[in-house]
Amino acid sequence: MKIGIACDHAGFDHKEKLKEYLLSKELIVEDFGCYSIESVDYPDFSHELCKSLENKKNIFGIQFCGTGNGINMTANKHLNIRAALCWKEEIAQQARLHNNANILTMPARHLNWDQVKEITDVFLETKFEGGRHQRRVEKINKI
Ligand code: RB5
């Protein structure tokens, strides 16, 4: 499974740990930055991650900023990106089951590493339920 990861400075530490964790599970990881705790602008990194999903280079994305909000809003500007802001396992599970989310966004400043790991595992292990949720997901882009 190919996964892209991205963050801003607030999410750098979690993103680095996550990269090691995903690699240890023998997943293929593409890191879109940022690469230090120096202050940066989260859209610069999220847009690159989203483009890699749009180009089908990566199947899923995982991204962090401090609250998760800014980077999540950015990703959801992309037409076929469904980024879900998840701060507990149940939300991550339903984001996959019901929303077919393709990006997991987490609020780095509000989660410890164990929580990040658990939320990530649930997100990657859960399959989209389809059925009535397929119809709803298809309506998301119909504005
Ligand atoms: C950076 O200080 C912070 O604003 C950012 O990480 C994020 O929380 C924005 O939504």
Image: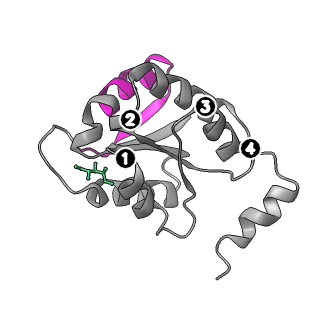
Residue at 26%, 46% (x, y): give it. Answer: 8
Q: Earlier in the sequence, mark 3 or mark 1?
A: 1
131 falls in the magenta region: no
Q: Nearer the viewer, residue 129 or 25?
A: 129
The nearer-to-camera label among 1 and 4 is: 1
The percent position of residue 36, horizontal first and vertical second, equals 16, 37
Q: Earlier in the sequence, mark 3 or mark 2?
A: 3
Q: Amino acid at mark 4?
A: Leu
Q: Are marks 2 and 1 in contact (CB under 8 Å)?
A: yes
The percent position of residue 11, horizontal first and vertical second, equals 30, 38
Q: Are marks 4 and 2 in contact (CB under 8 Å)?
A: no
The nearer-to-camera label among 4 and 3 is: 3
Query: Is the CB atom of the residue marked by disc 1 within 8 angstroms of ligand 1's nearest atom?
Result: yes
Q: Amino acid at mark 1?
A: Thr
Q: Residues within 10 Å of mark 2 (few under 14, many from 20)?
A: few
Give the colour scheme of this rendering.
one colour
Q: Earlier in the sequence, mark 2 or mark 1?
A: 1
Residue at 51%, 37% (x, y): give it. Answer: 87
Q: Range of the magenta residues?
A: 15-34
Query: Is the CB atom of the residue marked by disc 2 within 8 angstroms of ligand 1's nearest atom?
Result: no
Measured in 3D between alpha carbons, the distance from the residue under mark 4 to the one under mark 3, in whole angstroms, is 12 Å
User: Mark 2 highlights which residue?
Assistant: 110
| SS for callout 2 | helix
Point out the residue furthest to the right here. Answer: 131
Residue at 33%, 30% (x, y): give it. Answer: 14
Residue at 21%, 42% (x, y): give it. Answer: 9
Does residue 68 appear to the left or right of 35 in the view shown? right
User: Mark 3 highlights which residue?
Assistant: 89
Measured in 3D between alpha carbons, the distance from the residue under mark 3 to the one under mark 1, in whole angstroms, is 17 Å
Residue 137's image quarter? bottom right
User: Mark 4 highlights which residue?
Assistant: 97
Q: Earlier in the sequence, mark 4 or mark 3?
A: 3
